[in-house]
């Protein structure tokens, strides 16, 4: 990946000694579907309960951000362009308000931020600096590095796998969420689940569980199937693999309406559950599992890009994240940016 460094815009200097004023920070901005820029944006002044975080790494979401990029995200409140994406952010506190509960130098995870002015924050974390309430930040061990950007997705996977009567014994999709979900099933005391993955490039990297195609799997007695590929067209096939009383968990994001044949679902008394993101307790529990070594975040992020190389490098990173099946997770490295 090559790009000139001269096209990286410089934001107005930030002075942590006088933080009670708006400031500028470099950000990834989706100006419109298919149009990306790297430019300074203004952020609101922090208050007593806030912290200013200097960002080290952010993740690119191959789910929501792909929909923003393609203009296929279903309409919901707050969706407009231009927007700053990003809910997978790790950085250090460079200013802490007296009521923030944070200290200078703390390394924290930021599950999205809403401090940018005059652009939409969806979800606002892909910035060099940002403002966030101290209570929203998740403290990290000092040695925890770029892999910690995966905490929000770990919380999402945890919300999906533990919300039903049984832990999943079949997971569909071996991307980032699928890998985290499979690891979480084991971390929560379940048997290693079966994972389906249609793309050969994504079948590697399993951590003690089998990964195969649906055609190679003859089972039709699964108690819980967790759908993480985002393919709503699989719903009938998944219902057909359930034991009587089994459950399908829909934990991807589906831009098109979902339908299913009633009779096969009737014969199995199938249940369909939607897992919508994560709750604060999921994030706290995911962090605790990581902290005590029950859940590893290692070996999932496969690609990284240096934001200081400029706009072209960032565009290349997004294209790779969205279009290269071998890219399980792309990380943007902000540490060399002004």
Image (spheres, rainbow, N blue to C red):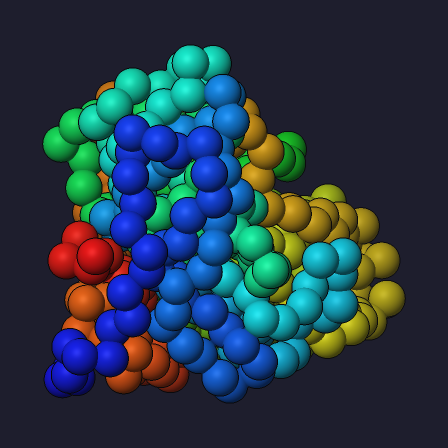
Query: Measured from the top left, where is residue 203 in percent x and y?
Result: 29, 69
Of the pair 250 and 51, the residue shown nearer to us: 51
At x 49%, y 20%, the residue is 48
At x 41%, y 77%, the residue is 37
User: With 313 as the anchor, is 275 left or right in this view?
Assistant: right
At x 75%, y 49%, the residue is 271
- Is residue 228 shown above or below 295? below
Query: Measured from the top left, where is residue 319 in percent x and y?
Result: 35, 82
Of the pair 297 and 269, the residue shown nearer to us: 297
Q: How many marks?
A: 0
Query: Measured from the top left, where is residue 16 in percent x and y?
Result: 29, 33
Residue 101 appearing in the image: yes
| Figure quadrant of residue 77 | bottom right
| Figure quadrant of residue 120 | bottom right
- Is residue 274 shown above or below 191? below
Residue 172 appearing in the image: no
The C terminus lies in quadrant: bottom left
User: With 142 as the anchor, is 27 left or right in this view?
Assistant: right
The N terminus lies in quadrant: bottom left
| Figure quadrant of residue 5 | bottom left
Query: Measured from the top left, where is residue 8 in percent x and y?
Result: 25, 73
At x 69%, y 50%, the residue is 274
Of the pair 166 and 77, the residue shown nearer to us: 77
């Amino acid at each position: 990946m090559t790009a000139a460094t001269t096209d990286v815009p410089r934001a107005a200097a930030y002075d942590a000694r006088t933080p009670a004023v708006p400031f500028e920070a470099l950000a990834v901005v989706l100006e419109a579907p298919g149009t990306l820029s790297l430019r300074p944006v203004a952020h609101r002044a922090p208050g007593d309960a806030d912290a200013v975080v200097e960002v080290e790494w952010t993740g690119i979401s191959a789910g929501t951000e792909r929909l923003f990029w393609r203009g296929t995200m279903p309409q919901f409140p707050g969706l407009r362009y231009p927007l700053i994406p990003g809910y997978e952010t790790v950085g250090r506190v460079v200013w802490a308000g007296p009521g923030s509960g944070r200290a200078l130098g703390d390394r924290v995870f930021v599950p999205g931020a809403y401090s940018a002015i005059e652009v939409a924050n969806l979800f606002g974390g892909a910035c060099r600096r940002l403002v966030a309430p101290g209570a929203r930040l998740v403290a990290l061990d000092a040695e925890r590095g770029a892999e910690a950007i995966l905490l929000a997705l770990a919380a999402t996977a945890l919300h999906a796998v533990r919300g039903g009567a049984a832990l999943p014994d079949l997971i569909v999709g071996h991307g980032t969420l699928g890998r985290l979900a499979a690891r979480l099933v084991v971390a929560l005391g379940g048997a290693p689940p079966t994972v389906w993955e249609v793309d050969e490039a994504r079948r590697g990297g399993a951590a003690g569980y089998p990964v195969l195609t649906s055609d190679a799997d003859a089972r039709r007695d699964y108690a819980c199937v967790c759908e993480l590929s985002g393919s709503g067209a699989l719903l009938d096939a998944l219902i057909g693999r359930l034991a009587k009383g089994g459950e399908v968990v829909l934990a991807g994001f589906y831009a098109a309406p979902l339908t299913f044949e009633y009779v096969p679902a009737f014969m199995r008394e199938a249940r369909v559950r939607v897992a919508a993101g994560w709750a604060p307790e999921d994030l706290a529990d995911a962090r605790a599992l990581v902290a005590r070594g029950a859940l590893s975040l290692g070996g999932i992020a496969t690609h990284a890009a240096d934001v200081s190389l400029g706009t072209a490098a960032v565009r290349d990173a997004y294209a790779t994240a969205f279009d290269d099946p071998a890219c399980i997770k792309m990380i943007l490295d902000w540490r060399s940016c002004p």
